[in-house]
Each structure stands twice: as C-alpha cells, then as structure tokens.
Image: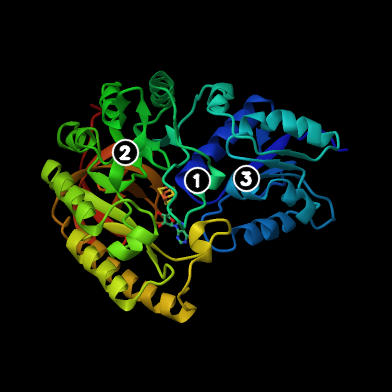
Amino acid sequence: MSAIPKTFRVKSFGCQMNVYDGERMAELLGASGMAAAGEGEDADLVVLNTCHIREKAAEKAYSDVGRLRREDGSKPLVALAGCVAQAEAGEAKARSAMIDIVVGPQAYHRLPQMVVEAAAGRRLVDTDMPALSKFDALPVRRRATPSAFLTVQEGCDKFCTYCVVPYTRGAEISRPWDDVVAEAQALVEGGAREIVLLGQNVNAWADGNRGLSGLIRQLAVIPGLERIRYTTSHPVNMSDDLIGAHADVEKLMPYLHLPVQSGSDRILKAMNRSHTAASYLRTIEKVRVARPDIAISGDFIVGFPDETGADFEATLNIVDEVRYASAFSFKYSPRPGTPAATMENPIPAEVMDERLQRLQAKLAEHSTAFNRSCIGRETRILIDRKGRKPGQMIGKSPWLQSVFVETEAAIGEMVDVRIDHALPNSLGGSVVRQAVAA
Ligand code: 5AD
Ligand code: SF4
C-alpha cells in the first residue's frame, strides 16, 4: 500500500515507436493529474518502456529495474512497459519483486487506472492486444516538438525468421485515415513543423484502398507543416505510388530508410524476407529516378545462421551498389521463440565481430562520401537542439544529417545554410538567411 504517485518519469529504450509510446504515456499520466519529475528528482512512479529486439533485452530490463531501489531502501512504483513487458508478461512479477505493473505496448492506455490499483497494493499485468482501442483512449495531443513522431501503423505480419516483432507487437494494423489526419493537425497546432510517420511496416499502411502515398499527400496540405518523413519501410511494400510521391510532394523529405538485412539471396530466403538482392536494387533504382538526390539508409544483420564468407561478400557488394547515406548494422542475436533461433550452423562470435567491423568500415566510407558531396550546397535545416558551444545550434537537413551552425535562430525555426564541412556523422554550415515559413 502506498500513496497515489504525484510525480512520474518515463524512460524509453529502443525504436522510435517506443519513443512515441513513451510520449503518449507521459501525456496520459499528465492528463490524469500527475506531474513529470524534474531532472535528477526522484519520481514516485517510474515507467521503463523496454525494447526486446536484440541481445539480452530482458536481463537488461531487470537490472534497470533493480537500480530503481533508492539509497534509503525505498522504491518508486515501477511499471515495466514495452516489448520486454509483452514478452515476459506474468513472468516479470515472479522475476522481480520490484515490479508493480506489467503493461504491454497495446494496453498502456490503461496505465492511470493500473497505477491507482498498484498504489493500493495490487500487482497487475496487462498484455492484451485489443485492436486500436489504445489510440481512442489517449488524450488529444496539445504540445509537440518541432519534429514529432506519429504512429500510424503497428505490428507486423511479415515474420522475418530472426525477428520478435510479430510476437511482441502483434498483427499488422493501420490507424484510420481520419484519426491520423486529426492527430497530425493537433501536432502542427501544438508546434510541430515536421511529422515523422511511424510504423514497423509504415509503407504497408492502408485504410481501405487508400495507401501511405495518399495519406502523405493529404498531410502535405496542412498549413504550417513543412516536412514529412516516414519510417520503417519494407521493400515489398514500396509501391509505385509511394515512390511517385517522392517525385512530386515537395514536403516529403528526400530520405528513405529501407532495410535490406543481407545481400545474399540464400540468406534473404532463410530470413523469409520475400525480396531478393536484385528486386531490392530495382526498387532503389526507381526511387532514385523519382528523386535523384535521395539519401538511402538501411539495416543489416551479419552472422545470420549459416552465413558463409560468400554470403557476407554479397552484403558488402550490395552496400557498394546502393551507396548508403547512413545505416544501422547489427550482429545476429537469436531471439527466443523465433524460427532462426533454432537454425543450424550458428556463426562463431569472432567471425561475427570481424564481419561487423568490415561492414561498418564500408558503410562509414559511403556515409562520409555522401556527407562530403553536400559541401558547398545551400540547404534548409530545421533547428532541433542546442549545440555544446555558445551560440551553436543543431538542425536537420532534408537528408536527415545533423548540421551544426552558429545562429540566433531558436529551436523549431528553419534556416538556410551553406554546408562548409563534413564529418562521418554530421555537417557544419553557415547561415545564409533565416527561412520564412511556407
Ligand atoms: N538480431 C540482430 N538484429 C536484429 N534486428 C531485428 N531482429 C534482430 C535480431 N534477432 C535488426 C534488423 C531490423 C532492426 C530494427 O533490428 O536489422 O531491421
Ligand atoms: Fe521484424 Fe521483419 Fe517485421 Fe521488420 S518486417 S518488424 S524485421 S518481422
């Protein structure tokens, strides 16, 4: 039995969809009368919004939970949320006496009620997956960051053999058109100038016969909204319509995150990716015809079971063909319950390490080359944070690079800059003029 919490803290790990969920949980707790704890301040309620995608996720979550015990031996109310909560469900209560609430990604709209019950001494688990009701139960959004996330699609039916997502986030569902447009409008009214549409398979978003390209075109007419992005896409859902939007929707930014995972058809088949290296390259080619300056980003897994040296070389080859502007690369990590976890010929750790290093060296060459190709270019950036040096601000280019500039412009403003120099992960520029809103 403890008092109903007055203050809360939500800590999100993992993907952007988790960040979005974390923001919505914070809004929900705020709307139910609690206040966000200030920096360094003890919170009465701590929500750990966890990620389960790779290595030892559950162990990490339990050790994070353990660290919430205060020096005087007391503890806050602890809610385990996110994908580890979904995967562990009732187990979590048994594994850690610190945990009061276990709440899955489709059930967090019930969090305020669960907090009240937990304060009365009950330990609760809710990992139901009711389709969509979560969004209906969340408060209207009133404040937004200059670049705001908006989840439009959740879950996955693709069942890549290495991936836990179909199990933790459930089947693919799309939010209705009207709900998405209303949330986008609220975000813009709350200060957003860029909206990033999110989904595990965002380009599979559909409402009846309307797809993501139609939604993007609709959002593009919202006054005050300057930029639209979307992530993450699956190669098989990269429709001609969506590719066409990159050619003619000016607000759609020239950036596409399109994971390939491997360049070897044999491995892609074992991964159940339903595309080949050649079909992926054809898609990239079409996207580049539509938008020649587009920045392509990707995800890679090295050391999938039975990956030979030749398979890995094929991955290096596709990296050279695509010339990725940025990328995320990972060592394969067996996820309990997924088909790949029991496949034969696991790859020894030292081979994985060596392959990851070689892949990352090659990816860094390409991202550095892409960044260098921007030197001398004039472009518009959206300021999103302060830099470390006095007077320095950091903004995002259309190609999602971080650009450091000296300017008096505030967070949320746009400035036109000339790119002066390039590093592997960022650019430096000087202001040409302050941009006026469209
Ligand atoms: N092991 C390693 N990487 C993985 N990813 C997903 N599941 C695994 C796994 N079991 C990577 C993929 C995916 C990204 C979000 O995480 O590259 O695109
Ligand atoms: Fe996981 Fe594959 Fe679905 Fe992506 S497409 S979420 S990698 S199963």
Residue on which disc 2 sits: 229
Depth check, mark 1 against mark 2: the one in front is 1
Q: In the rendered structure, which disc, 1 or 3, sits on the residue that comes first in sequence?
A: 3
Which residue in the rendered view is the most extreme toward the bottom?
A: 350
In this rendering, would 22 be left or right of 114? left
Residue on which disc 3 sits: 86
> Which secondary structure, mark 2?
strand
Q: Calculate the distance from the C-alpha at mark 1 to the C-alpha at mark 2.
A: 24 Å
Residue 343 in the image: above or below residue 326: below
**Which quadrant would residue 56 be assigned to in this image?**
bottom right
Q: Quadrant of the C terminus?
A: top left
Residue 415: where, in percent of width, then height?
25, 40
Residue type at numbered disc 2: Arg
In this rendering, would 130 be left or right of 276? right
Q: Calculate the distance from the C-alpha at mark 2 to the C-alpha at mark 3.
A: 28 Å
Residue 189: where, in percent of width, then height?
41, 22
Depth check, mark 2 against mark 3: the one in front is 3
Q: Residues within 10 Å of mark 2 (few under 14, many from 20)?
A: many
Q: What's the residue at 45%, 66% (across, down)? A: 332
Residue on which disc 1 sits: 166
> Which secondary structure, mark 1?
helix
Depth check, mark 1 against mark 3: the one in front is 1
Question: Would you say residue 410 is visible in this rendering?
Answer: no
> Which secondary structure, mark 3?
helix
